[in-house]
Image (tube, rainbow, N blue to C red):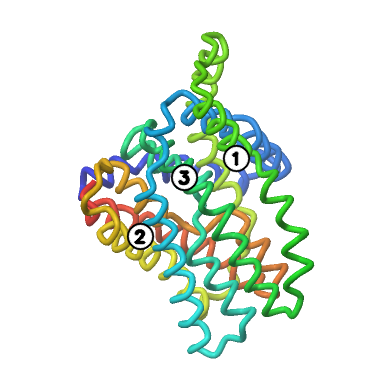
């Protein structure tokens, strides 16, 4: 366990650095907003395209991984939804809580953590598959239930679909899949440029996490907050681990790829969770849950790595 704590210490040092430069006004919040756009629109798509296009498609697509991560995430969502409803939340409130439990911050948190623990190759493979699952299944499902709770399901979902499909990470994954399916080799110069860009994204993403948390407000830790935090940090990785046992027992999926799935499920909720919370009338709960989950993940992630056999 001590070795695991030493392993993940750089993650929280970088998060703390990002938090500090905003709280101490060394950098302005606008600078971090621009940084987030550069990471999300330039460096991470380059990493993702390289990871998929630079390998045979059979080395990227793992249907057991897709089934386990999607199944574990869907199970987490509906268990969280049921728990919130039993606690007295209306449909909309339960839906936003369930979203926080089942949608990970895979880009800014999950990928850097997995890269550090299992190495860049398998971390990127798992990340590419999670991006497809989140953008094609989890986020549309979660937003649809939230909209149903607000009594405005159809039109809002149709407005969201183009934004999801134009997500730079999803586009990069699709382009990489098309390139790999075509059996094309990357031009040497293009490959060198992409390999120069690839290592930049993970440390910048962790700085971005700290800067984002520094701009949120802690407004009381109530029952809803603790349900969401426990669901995200404990229930989600547990459900994915259980699903891996159910679907992956006879496959050749590497143990490190299984660990990647559990790790990404075990990081805090997606970075825009507080924005969704504000949109659906749970601003204080979602922002507070994001802060608390980020802080407590320093305890939960080592446990997840240890129990998952990392």
Q: Mark 2: which secondary structure? A: helix
Q: Position of residue 175 (x, y in %)?
A: 60, 32
Q: Residues within 10 Å of mark 3 (few under 14, many from 20)?
A: many
Q: Position of residue 277 (x, y in %)?
A: 65, 68
Residue at the farthest top position = 189
- Residue drawn 55% across and 26% down? 179
Instruction: Give me the C-alpha separation between circle 3 and circle 1.
Output: 11 Å
Circle 3 is placed at which residue position? 129
Q: Residue 169: which disc? A: 1
- Residue drawn 58% across and 52% down? 135
Report the side of 148 relative to 83 (left or right).
right
Q: Earlier in the sequence, mark 3 or mark 1?
A: 3
Q: Position of residue 261 (x, y in %)?
A: 37, 50
Q: Of the residues tagged 3 and 1, which is closer to the observer?
A: 3
Circle 2 is placed at which residue position? 240
Regarding residue 276, the answer to whether it shows in the image is yes
Q: Quadrant of residue 137?
A: bottom right
Q: Earlier in the sequence, mark 1 or mark 2?
A: 1
């Amino acid at each position: 366990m001590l070795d695991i704590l030493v392993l993940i210490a750089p993650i929280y040092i970088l998060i703390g650095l990002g938090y500090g430069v905003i709280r101490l006004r060394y950098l302005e919040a606008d600078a971090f907003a621009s940084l987030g756009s550069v990471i999300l629109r330039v460096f991470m798509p380059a990493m993702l395209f390289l990871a998929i296009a630079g390998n045979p498609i059979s080395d990227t697509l793992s249907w057991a991984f897709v089934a386990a991560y999607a199944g574990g995430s869907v199970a987490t969502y509906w268990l969280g939804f049921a728990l919130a409803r039993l606690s007295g939340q209306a449909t909309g409130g339960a839906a936003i809580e369930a979203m926080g439990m089942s949608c990970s911050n895979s880009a800014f948190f999950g990928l850097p953590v997995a890269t550090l623990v299992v190495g860049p190759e398998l971390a990127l493979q798992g990340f590419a598959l999670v991006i497809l699952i989140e953008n094609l299944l989890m986020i549309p499902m979660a937003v649809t239930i939230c909209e149903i709770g607000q009594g405005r399901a159809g039109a809002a979902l149709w407005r969201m679909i183009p934004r999801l499909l134009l997500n730079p990470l999803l586009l990069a994954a699709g382009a990489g899949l098309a390139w790999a399916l075509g059996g094309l080799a990357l031009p040497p110069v293009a490959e060198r440029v992409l390999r120069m860009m690839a290592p930049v994204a993970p440390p910048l993403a962790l700085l971005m996490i700290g800067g984002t948390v520094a701009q949120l407000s802690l407004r009381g830790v109530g029952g809803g907050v603790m349900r969401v935090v426990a669901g995200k940090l404990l229930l989600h990785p547990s459900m994915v681990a259980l699903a891996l046992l159910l679907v992956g027992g006879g496959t050749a999926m590497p143990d490190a790829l299984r660990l990647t799935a559990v790790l990404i499920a075990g990081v805090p909720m997606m970075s825009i969770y507080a924005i969704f919370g504000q949109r659906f009338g749970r601003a204080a709960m979602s922002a507070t849950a994001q802060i608390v989950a980020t802080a407590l993940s320093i305890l939960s992630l080592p446990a997840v790595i240890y129990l998952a056999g990392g």
